[in-house]
Image (cartoon, rainbow, N blue to C red):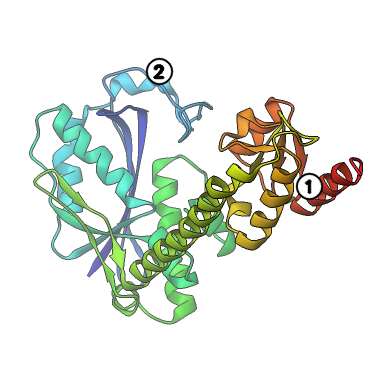
Amino acid sequence: MKYLFFDIECAGVFKNVAKICAFGYCLVDEQFHILEKEDLLINPKGNFHLTDRKGTRGLVLPYEYDQFKKYPTFPEVVEKIRSLLEDKDTLVAGHATMNDVKYLNLETYRFSLPSFCFRFADTQFLYMNKIGDFSRQFALGTIAESLGVEFTAHRAVDDAYATMKVAEAICKELGADLPTLIERYEIKLGKIENYEIEQTTSTAQKRYQEEAYRRKELREQKRAQVHRFIDREKRNRNKNGVLRGKRFCFSHPFEESVEEAQQLVRLAFSLGCFYSYRAEECDYYVAYETENGARLKSAKEQHAQIFTPVGFAEFLKNKGAGTD
């Protein structure tokens, strides 16, 4: 069996268009000896419009953009790419492979070409199974650095080569070949056929997702319990209290601390303070010191006083003592 590691760079990616400008690949044998290594440069038939994943900061590819018009178009190289990816004796892999497969799919649509048909592995997903962490995405550079692999980012062939070296390093560390590790981690390969794409999955990932869903449900139940308590207790609010006309709001993580949140609600209501579910409308915002995010930012933009739970309790007690 051979292994084909590939990476794609695009001149621009939009909702329904991915203008591929480079297809880099590294074909190796089962011992990771390089059989072929090439950077296929492609005329994207369009201008370069490069942004990061958030669609803001511009990316710079290590190519001369004005040279791409002289390269063949995607329809002119698609059969070479197809022969590499669809070879029955080759295991195809990439880093975050789903993205590159989507680009191929969009280009076949764009040029009215037949769909690709192949299965694929993902070294990022293999790494996530290896370390047991599915909570976030891991950049190729991050994984490569952790495994001692050096490369030039965003040159397609170098990314493909680095992806191969990452796979090789994982296989050497665990003492197994790539198909064995895929079987060991119960990974189901991704697939593209008839323009439909299936993501790679694994048993460990499914367990993680089930546990994450369970934890999310529990958090939502706790928050709902606090909200019900607020709606019930607000009828007993002291409308003439020293903090009448003021509003307080809890961060979502603190709303999950049911007993502590309920105690602060009672104390704040006894002083006439009203609860707001909108951070941007509050005078006092209560959050843990380690928190950040949009709700905290909104509260700060409205010049709300920011308290820790302990700090807000002291503030309320002092206000209450001042009325004695």
Q: Is residue 128 above or below residue 174?
A: above
Q: Mark 2 packing: few (<14 Cα in 10 Å), some, or many (20+)?
A: few
Q: Quadrant of residue 53?
A: top left
Q: Nearer the viewer, residue 126 or 209?
A: 209
Q: Nearer the viewer, residue 284 or 84?
A: 284
Residue at x 60%, y 60% (from the top left corner): 258
Q: Earlier in the sequence, mark 1 or mark 2?
A: 2
Q: Amino acid at mark 2?
A: Asp
Report the side of 160 relative to 295 (left or right): left
Q: Which mark is residue 312?
A: 1
Residue, disc 2:
66
Q: Amino acid at mark 1?
A: Phe
Residue at x 45%, y 72% (from the top left corner): 130
Q: Residue furthest bottom?
A: 175
Q: At which x and y percent is residue 284?
A: 73, 37
Is residue 150 visible in the rendered image? The answer is: no
Image quarter of the C terminus = top right
Q: Quadrant of residue 212?
A: bottom left
Q: At which x and y percent is residue 267?
A: 74, 50
Q: Nearer the viewer, mark 1 or mark 2?
A: 1
Q: Quadrant of residue 178?
A: bottom left
Residue at x 77%, y 36% (from the top left corner): 241
Q: At which x and y percent is residue 140?
A: 48, 52
Q: At which x and y percent is residue 230?
A: 57, 48
SS category of the residue bearing label 2 = helix
Give the Cα distance between marks 1 and 2: 60 Å
Report the side of 264 relative to 145 (left or right): right
Q: Is residue 158 above or below residue 241?
A: below
Report the side of 127 relative to 144 (left or right): left
